[in-house]
Each structure stands twice: as structure tokens, then as C-alpha cells.
Image (spheres, rainbow, N blue to C red):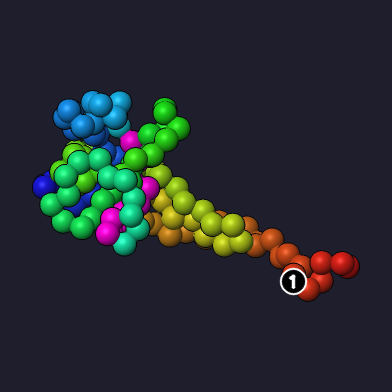
Amino acid sequence: MNSKTISFGDTVRVRKTDLTTKAGLAELTGSVYGETTPSVTDVDVIGELTEDYAINVYFEDKGQDAWFGADLLEFIDHGEGTEIRLDGVDKKWTRAEDGTWIEESTGEKPVMRRPWWKFWS
């Protein structure tokens, strides 16, 4: 397993194996977008699972993602500077070098939408 725990927002590299080479993803670098329990979600996972856990990696250059067993991924960094914003929330979260998320107010007022029942006015 990895010496560092891989989590959402981290930058990882796919290890070169027969499976990752066949998938065209060997040695690519991407961002961790999620994790799951494959026995529940029934996702297609590249690699042999040693536990019921898989990691989703998005490859910006390819415009695609894939699920991997954790042993096929190498930790690179925590994706320092990655920013998350949610529609209607006047906050943002920025990833720090140590992997923590720093919460800040954006000072923007959330856009108020009409209630669904006032769609005709």
C-alpha cells in the first residue's frame, strides 16, 4: 500500500503494469475525484482489490476518469491550490500543501432563486 493515504484532491501517478498499460493509463498523472466500495457501487476497477475499496482518478489531458485499486497509484502531492466552490454558497475551500482544506468566505451573496411554486410569476 502507499506510504501516504491517498484522498480527494490529491495528485497521483498510475503505476506501470500490464493492466494499466493495456488500459492506456500507465504512468499518467491525475487528480483523485472520489473513492468507493466496489461491492456496493459495482464500478469497473482496474487492478486486483486487496480490500473493498477503489479510488477514482480524473485525467484532465484525456478528459476521462477511471477506478483503481489503491496499490496501482503513487502519491505525488496534495494538489496544493486546488479550489472548490459550490453554487449558492458564499465560501470556497482551497487545498493547502499539507492536505488540509482552508475555508474562506468569498464575500459573494448567494443568488436567490424563486421557489419552484412561483415558476409562473
Left-right relation of 110 to 37: right
Q: Is residue 10 visible?
A: no
Residue 69, x across and y down, in percent: 21, 46
Left-right relation of 110 to 64: right
Question: Which residue is nearer to you in this view: 84 or 35?
Answer: 35
Residue 17, x across and y down, in percent: 16, 29
Q: Quadrant of residue 30?
A: top left
Question: Which residue is nearer to you in this view: 31 or 95?
Answer: 31
Q: Amino acid at mark 1?
A: Pro
Identified at 24% across, 34% down, the residue is: 13
Q: Is residue 34 visible?
A: yes
**Local SS, label 1:** loop
Give the extent of the magenta segment: 30-39
Identified at 74% across, 71% down, the residue is: 115
Residue labelled with disc 1? 115
Question: Which residue is nearer to you in this view: 96 or 77?
Answer: 77
Left-right relation of 114 to 102: right
Identified at 34% across, 50% down, the residue is: 43
Question: Which residue is nearer to you in this view: 34 or 78?
Answer: 34
Identified at 25% across, 26% down, the residue is: 22
Residue 112, x across and y down, in percent: 71, 65
Q: Quadrant of residue 42?
A: bottom left
Tell me the quarter of the image containing the C terminus: bottom right
Q: Residues within 10 Å of mark 1 (few under 14, many from 20)?
A: few
